[in-house]
Amino acid sequence: MSRVGIRFFIKVQLALVSIILLTSHNQVSAEPYGMAGCGLGSMVPAWKNDIGQVVAATTNGSLSSQTFGITSGTSNCTTDGIVRADRVQEVFVTYNEEPLELETTQGTGERIRTIASLLGCPTHGIELGKLMKEKHSYIFEKSKEGDSTTRSQLILSRLKSKIAEDPTLKQACLY
């Protein structure tokens, strides 16, 4: 999909959300959400049925509101606003392991920028990408038999150890 197409799609989604929020007579509350999960799409009361869940999931995905909500504890993602950063990082790596590894070989990409944000250094994505490219074989090294650590935990642990060795990133990131 072209950038113009993506922008148009996002504008349509925002317009739909705005219309539904403005015309809804129910208060938006942090009630349990449907199968689409938390995020901006879960906050529209009219979207509790099956079709609404598809629209909610599309809204969450196209606007990245679910990722932001999970990270920040907003958009109906938690009841107390507290999310453990390490758990969010682990979930992200688990669901993005292969494309993240591919982007790491190039040293740039959307997932590298996202992991930089999740590690607390969103303005240092370029530096993190360079580090990840340089240390790719170590970060994504296959685990040994009998290791009880999950692959995503191992990747994160190795990445964080390399960040700790980098003078710029260890100061910038809040991992």
Image (tube, helix red, strand yellow):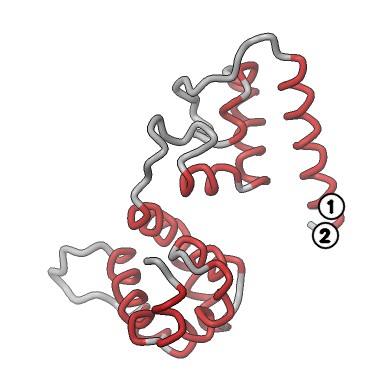
Where is 4 relative to 171, above or below?
A: above
Identify the residue under disc 2: 2
Q: What percent of the width, then of the height, locates residue 165? A: 34, 86
- The answer to whether the residue labelled 1 contacts the one labelled 2, judged by CB atoms less than 8 Å apart, is yes
- Is 71 drawn above or below residue 148 in the view shown? above
* In the displayed structure image, the side of residue 173 where residue 66 appears, left or right: right
Residue type at numbered disc 1? Gly
Q: How many marks?
A: 2
Quarter holding the C terminus is bottom left
Residue 51 percent location from the top left of the image: 64, 23
Q: Is residue 159 above or below residue 84?
A: below
Q: Work out how far the residue at label 1 is from the one at label 2, CA to CA, in angstroms.
A: 5 Å
How packed is label 1: few (under 14 Cα within 10 Å), some, or many (20 or more)?
A: few
Which residue sits furthest front? Answer: 171
Q: Residue at x 53, y 20 (%)?
A: 29
Q: Residue furthest bottom?
A: 134
Quadrant of the rendering where the N terminus is positioned: bottom right
Q: Position of residue 118 (x, y in %)?
A: 46, 61
Q: Residue furthest top?
A: 25
Q: Is residue 144 depicted above or below 93 in this figure? A: below
The residue under label 2 is which amino acid type?
Ser
Residue at screen point 48% across, 65% down: 115
x then y, percent, for residue 138: 34, 85
Residue at disc 1, secondary structure: helix
Few, some or many residues within 10 Å of mark 2 (<14, 14–19, 20+): few
Reading the image, the residue beneath label 1 is 5
Q: Is residue 132 left or right of residue 14?
A: left
Q: Is residue 164 left or right of residue 125?
A: left
Which element type, helix, strand or loop, lies under badge 2? loop
Q: Which mark is residue 93?
A: none
